[in-house]
Image: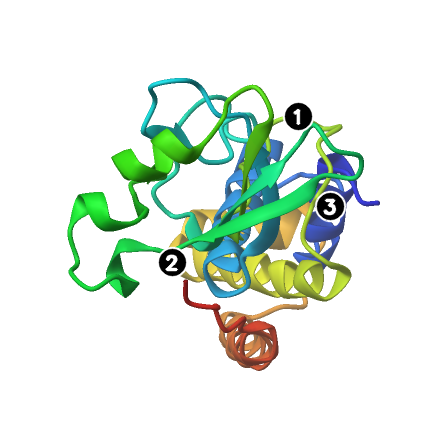
């Protein structure tokens, strides 16, 4: 289990700046969160969540607790079911059909998902008993951004290596774009042996490494 602080240290080491003399912690944090967003796009977190239904309610924010009550429009749903939560273990009741699979694609013929919010039809709401039922959903979600040293880096070990490759590109690009930063990196971080040409070669190698790992990570989504 890798923490945000540990991962930041690994990224600093990859950039040959282990003492944070060139890239400060905020710089590295931005690179890591950018990599986390990119990994969430190509290899999203697969999740299953139970939503407690509320009487006379047609709309539910998916993964509300995970994203601090905010609706995340990048979530994708693959399946919605109704289960009897009063049983132990919970008992399957029915699979809910998305509106796109019904005889006519309109809001009240099935469930639909938009902007991170699950919308149920009136007939579905009527069939749900809030006292015993629960709404069980499966889908794909981006990862939440990290801002605390104790945060756990949630992607798999393979995805973490890809994140490090992505961060290396981000760091090397900054060095190639900003001459003052490159000079500082050479002197402060003891990288005087690296010339601008060597830096561009390292950037090219890092980009190829990222492309190789990206192709391996790509997750095909299941459609509703």
In this view, which residue lies farthest toward the right?
Answer: 1
Image coords of residue 43 (percent x, y): 55, 63
**Residue 71 in view (yes/no):** no
At 75% from the left and 40% from the top, the residue drawn is 19
Please state which of residues 135 and 146 is positioned toward the viewer in this rendering. 135
Sequence-wise, which precedes: disc 2 or disc 3?
A: 3
Density class for disc 3 (Cα within 10 Å; few <14, some 14-19, many ≥20) is many
Q: Which residue is mark 3?
A: 7
At 50% from the left and 29% from the top, the residue drawn is 67
Density class for disc 1 (Cα within 10 Å; few <14, some 14-19, many ≥20) is few
Sequence-wise, which precedes: disc 3 or disc 1?
A: 3
Q: Secondary structure at mark 1?
A: loop
Please state which of residues 211 and 168 is positioned toward the viewer in this rendering. 211
Question: What's the distance in space between the residues labelled 1 and 2, CA to CA?
Answer: 29 Å
Q: Which residue is mark 1?
A: 148
Image coords of residue 79 (percent x, y): 48, 55
- Which quadrant holds residue 191? bottom right
Q: Which mark is drawn over residue 177?
A: 2
At 54% from the left and 71% from the top, the residue drawn is 219
């Amino acid at each position: 289990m890798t923490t945000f602080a540990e991962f930041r240290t690994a990224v600093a080491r990859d950039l040959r700046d282990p003492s944070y003399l060139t890239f400060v912690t905020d710089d590295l944090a931005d690179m890591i969160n950018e990599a986390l967003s990119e990994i969430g796009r190509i290899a999203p977190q697969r999740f299953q969540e139970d939503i407690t239904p509320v009487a006379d309610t047609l709309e539910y924010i998916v993964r509300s607790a995970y994203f601090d009550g905010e609706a995340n429009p990048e979530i994708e749903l693959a399946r919605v079911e109704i289960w009897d939560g009063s049983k132990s273990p919970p008992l399957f009741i029915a699979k809910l059909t998305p509106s796109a699979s019904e005889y006519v694609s309109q809001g009240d013929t099935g469930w639909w998902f938009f902007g991170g919010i699950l919308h149920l039809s009136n007939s579905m709401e009527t069939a749900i008993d809030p006292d015993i039922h629960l709404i069980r959903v499966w889908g794909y979600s981006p990862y939440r951004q990290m801002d605390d040293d104790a945060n756990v880096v949630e992607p798999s070990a393979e995805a973490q290596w890809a994140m490090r490759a992505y961060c290396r590109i981000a760091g090397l690009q900054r060095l190639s774009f900003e001459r003052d930063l490159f000079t500082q990196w050479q002197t402060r971080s003891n990288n005087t042996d690296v010339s601008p040409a060597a830096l561009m070669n390292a950037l090219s190698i890092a980009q190829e490494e990222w492309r190789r790992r990206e192709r391996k990570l790509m997750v095909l989504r299941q459609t509703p």
